[in-house]
Structures are given as structure tokens and as C-alpha cells.
Image (cartoon, rainbow, N blue to C red):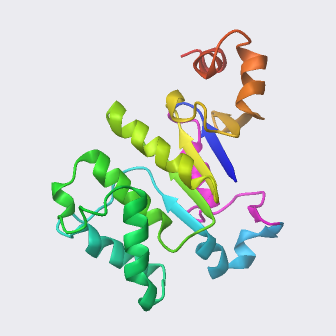
């Protein structure tokens, strides 16, 4: 399906926009639409289609990973008889199926980030939103997380907010560029390169727009 990226430096407004889309912040104006319907009119149905991974790791280090995923599944109102199957499915998708019995406090930063991805996709939401999902990860874990999100985009809509250029190279279908809370561009990676860095790449697009 789709892999869309909200791209810009820190303070550009990416997290604010993510929080508006997920209804954590109220709109001053405008609309959030899902299949032509305003999200505020969909109520619980909108929350069912939405999976959100906020910036920062809000985890319970005393929980095992399995207990944490069970807790998230209950919060998402996954039917009781499906919870175990869902936990096994999402943990396998992020390569944590053999680590479920460990306490989260024993996890590395990359493992915690993958656990949060598993928590985001449990319940099979159609729209996945990730806010700076690779922040603070080493290059190996960043590649692993990037591959996971690319796989998810095969049958879901995936939106990622990032200021890290390699996060979106070769995987984003469409890029939205924010600067100072204003939409600067909305286009395919190829068109952005043609417009801003004809003989370069997305890193050059970033430099030419933001001067950083």
C-alpha cells in the first residue's frame, strides 16, 4: 500500500501533526479525513484503524515483553481468544518471538523500539503512524527497524515522521516536507530530487531546503 514520510528538522512541526492526526491534540482549524469521513465523527471506529508509536519509549521495565503486549492488547480491546495468537504474530514480525519472557528492563534500546512497533501493530490497525522510530538507535538496529516498517507498508498505510534522511531512502512513496509548521512540499522522492537536487539525492534535497 503506501509509505508516507513527514520530513523536516527538529521543531518543524512533525510531532504536532502526528498528535493532531491521532487526536491527541485538537484542531484549531481544518479536518482529518479517513476515506472521506472526518475522524471526529468516527469515534471508536477511528481508533480501531489507528496504530500509533509516539516519540520516546514509554515502557514498563518490570514487565516481561509478553505481559506488556498482553496489556496493550487488552487496552485495544482485542478479543480474549485472539490475544495469544496476536502476541505471537506481532512478536515474530519484529523478531522478538524468542525474547517474550525477558523483562523489558533487560532489553537493548533497539529491542525496546521493536517491542513498541509490535505494540503498535497489535490488533491489526490499517493506519500506522511512527514518530521518530529510529531515534537513538545504532546503524544496525536502524536498518532492522527500517526493514520492518517497509514490510508493514505492503498491506497497510504507514506514516513516519523523521529528520533522519536514511530512514526514508528507497522506501517512501511520498514525502511531505514541513518547515516551521508550514507545508513546504508534497511529492515523490524522485520529483523532489529532480526539483531540488537534480544530480544528487534526498540528503541534498534536505540541505537545499533547510540549509543544514
Left or right of residue 163: residue 179: right
- Say above or below: 58 vs 49: above
Left or right of residue 62: residue 139: right
Residue 7 on image: x %, y %: 60, 35
Magenta extent: 10-35
Residue 82 on image: x %, y %: 45, 85
Q: Is residue 74 visible?
A: no
Residue at the (55%, 71%) spot, across then down: 124
Prevailing SS of the magenta stretch: loop
Residue at the (51%, 35%) spot, across then down: 167
To which quarter of the image does residue 49 belong? bottom right
Residue 133 on image: x %, y %: 44, 46
Residue 96 on image: x %, y %: 31, 59
Check if residue 22 falls in the magenta segment: yes
Residue at the (35%, 31%) spot, across then down: 139
Q: Is residue 177 visible?
A: yes
- Say above or below: 167 vs 41: above
To which quarter of the image does residue 190 belong? top right
Residue at the (60%, 74%) spot, across then down: 47
- Say above or below: 157 vs 41: above
Amino acid at each position: 500500500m503506501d509509505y508516507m514520510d513527514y520530513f523536516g528538522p527538529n521543531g518543524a512541526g512533525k510531532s504536532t501533526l502526528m498528535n493532531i492526526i491521532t487526536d491527541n491534540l485538537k484542531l484549531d482549524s481544518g479536518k482529518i479525513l479517513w476515506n472521506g469521513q472526518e475522524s471526529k465523527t468516527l469515534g471508536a471506529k477511528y481508533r480501531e484503524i489507528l496504530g500509533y508509536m509516539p516519540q520516546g519509549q514509554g515502557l514498563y521495565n518490570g514487565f516481561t515483553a509478553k505481559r506488556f503486549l498482553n496489556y496493550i492488547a487488552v487496552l485495544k480491546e482485542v478479543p480474549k481468544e485472539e490475544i495469544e495468537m496476536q502476541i505471537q504474530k506481532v512478536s515474530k514480525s519484529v523478531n522478538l518471538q524468542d525474547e517474550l519472557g525477558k523483562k523489558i528492563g533487560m532489553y537493548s534500546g533497539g529491542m525496546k523500539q521493536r517491542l513498541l512497533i509490535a505494540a503498535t501493530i497489535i490488533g491489526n490497525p490499517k493506519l500506522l503512524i511512527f514518530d521518530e522510530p529510529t531515534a537513538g538507535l545504532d546503524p544496525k538496529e536502524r536498518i532492522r527497524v527500517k526493514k520492518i516498517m517497509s514490510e508493514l507498508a505492503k498491506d497497510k498505510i504507514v506514516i513516519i515522521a523523521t529528520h533522519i534522511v536514511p530512514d526514508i531512502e528507497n522506501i517512501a512513496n511520498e514525502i511531505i516536507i514541513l518547515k516551521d509548521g508550514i507545508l513546504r512540499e508534497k511529492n515523490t522522492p524522485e520529483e523532489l530530487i529532480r526539483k531540488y537536487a537534480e544530480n544528487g539525492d534526498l540528503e541534498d534535497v534536505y540541505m537545499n531546503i533547510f540549509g543544514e
